[in-house]
Amino acid sequence: MFCGLGKNFTMTILDEAFKGSNRAIGRLISIVENESEGFLEILKKIYPLTGKAKIIGITGPPGVGKSTLVAQIAKIYLRKNKSVGILAVDPSSPISGGSLLGDRIRMTHLPLDKNIFIRSLSSRGTLGGISQATLNVARLLDALGYNIIIIETVGVGQDEVEIINVASTAILVLSSGFGDEIQALKAGVMEVADIFVVNKADHPDTSKYVSTIEKMIHQFSNRKAWTPPIVKTIALSSEGCEELIEKIEEHTNFCKNNKAMLEEFKQKYLLEIRKLVERKLTQELDYFFKEKFNLEDFYEKQSTKNSDPYSIAEQTILAFKSFLKT
Ligand SMILES: Nc1nc2c(ncn2[C@@H]2O[C@H](COP(=O)(O)OP(=O)(O)O)[C@@H](O)[C@H]2O)c(=O)[nH]1
Ligand SMILES: [Mg+2]
């Protein structure tokens, strides 16, 4: 925590990070992830430097081979002289840290290189939840000059959809042997995926599984200008990974040239602002109820004829509005 150390201190860390200090980058990420003092100043300052990186989101059920795949993709990009930042998001509590440790070990097969930065994010964040915290950290890496940012997140629920939605290309990884999982897939995650990967293509049931997914894609994405391709991979041996990278490039180019996509990005941006406003207001409201306005006292003072919840809520809002003006 850097509470009390002040703005100048965080700005010094920012300078150090820009000079390439991995330690400073790590501390900056902690400030942004934990929303410690000075984090908004950092985010405002770095924002003009963002927008250059390619942000790839990867999600899917546990065990399908996401981490193995992330490591292979990272290796290919490193060979292409790109710098890579990897963010592994575990939205659960640190209790499940064991699996992350496993991921870290698997990812250490990556060459130790100054062009690579790996970090696990576990904080839910307070300002805008885990997806906003992930976006903030990804922007930080983008501003620091990382060319490729890969976000790995576990699962196919609402949180994961929000997290991969932060990416410019969202990839859903599946593999045969997860037949039950696909039944449980929500429309949300099918709609948000730009590319489907069927990993563990060494498994004999792969072709059958691919046809099932093809049918599902058809069902979910027939209104979209971009039809998500399915790429078969064997992450263990890197088979199919070059093709996956080609599809990522294709998707990036498609987005650059597509009006509907530009509109979609604008809508995402406006939604982010709206969510930031909502979260800030919720924080103010929490403070108001905790420190400034005792709802129970207020309720007790009402005469019986005025004590319907609608009127009390209206009066409370009036009091909150005048609190905001102070
Ligand atoms: N047979 C096979 N196993 C794989 C493949 N990719 C990953 N695995 C294995 O699947 C297990 C889970 O991989 P991991 O990358 O941790 O999956 P994650 O939970 O989705 O991140 C590990 O034992 C990997 O070695 C593959 O293409 N084929
Ligand atoms: Mg993993």
Image: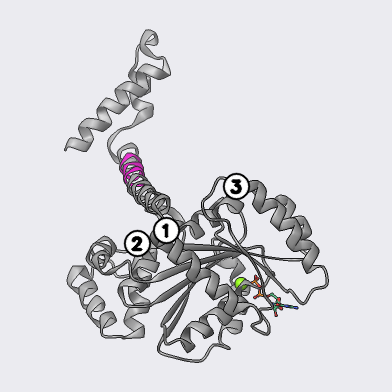
Label pair 3/2, CB-CB below 8 angstroms = no
Q: How is the image coloured?
A: one colour
Report if residue 196 is visible in the image. yes
Disc 3 marks a residue whose amino acid type is: Asn
Left or right, 7 with respect to 188, comes to: left
Coordinates of residue 12 in the picture (x, y in percent)? 21, 78
Q: Which residue is mark 3?
A: 222
Q: Which residue is mark 2?
A: 35
State whether residue 240 is above or below residue 179.
below
State whether residue 66 is above or below residue 84.
above
Residue numbers of the magenta segment: 277-285
Coordinates of residue 191 in the picture (x, y in percent)? 57, 51
Residue 314 vs residue 115, the one in the foreground: 115
Mark 1, ligand 2, within 8 Å: the answer is no
Label pair 1/2, CB-CB below 8 angstroms = yes
User: Quarter-wise, where is residue 231 in the image?
Assistant: bottom right
Residue 307 vs residue 269, the one in the foreground: 269
Residue 226 vs residue 244, the one in the foreground: 226
Q: Which residue is located at x 61 percent, y 83 percent? A: 106
Q: Which residue is mark 1?
A: 125
